[in-house]
Image (tube, rainbow, N blue to C red):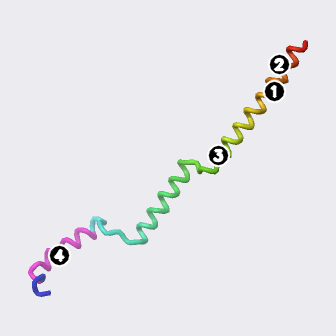
């Protein structure tokens, strides 16, 4: 321990620098940032489930449009 005594001032200065500029992060700060990132992701991106539901709905709409088109062609062709 005596071998580190001459460097004590430098060690304290380095740790003060790290602490002041936020080099070391506490778990609370990390968890807070993680929550912020998740909230931003929820606002900007759709979930996989939502995208699949929309694809299914679009496929159903396409089928309905096709059936309406066939009905209209049958009526126009029958006249």
Residue 29 spot, x, y in % from top left: 41, 68
Q: Which residue corresponds to mark 1?
A: 68
Q: Earlier in the sequence, mark 1 or mark 4?
A: 4
Q: Which residue corresponds to mark 4?
A: 11
Q: Earlier in the sequence, mark 1 or mark 3?
A: 3
Q: Quick one: SS at disc 1?
A: helix
Q: Quick one: SS at disc 2?
A: helix
Q: Which residue corresponds to mark 3?
A: 52
Q: Quick one: SS at disc 3?
A: helix
User: Residue 38's mark?
Assistant: none
Q: Earlier in the sequence, mark 2 or mark 1?
A: 1
Residue 17 on the magenta segment: yes
Residue located at (83% from left, 21% from top): 72
- Residue 75 in which image quadrant: top right
Q: Do the residues labelled 2 and 1 touch (CB within 8 Å)?
A: no
Q: Give the range drawn in magenta.
A: 5-19
Q: How far apart are marks 1 and 3 (CA)?
A: 25 Å
User: Residue 73's mark?
Assistant: 2
């Amino acid at each position: 321990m005596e071998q580190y005594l001459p460097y004590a001032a430098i060690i304290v200065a380095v740790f003060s620098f790290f602490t002041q500029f936020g080099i070391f992060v506490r778990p609370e700060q990390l968890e807070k940032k993680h929550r912020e990132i998740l909230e931003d992701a929820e606002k900007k991106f759709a979930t996989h489930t939502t995208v699949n539901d929309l694809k299914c709905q679009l496929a159903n709409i396409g089928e309905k449009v096709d059936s309406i088109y066939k009905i209209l062609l049958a009526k126009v062709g029958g006249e």
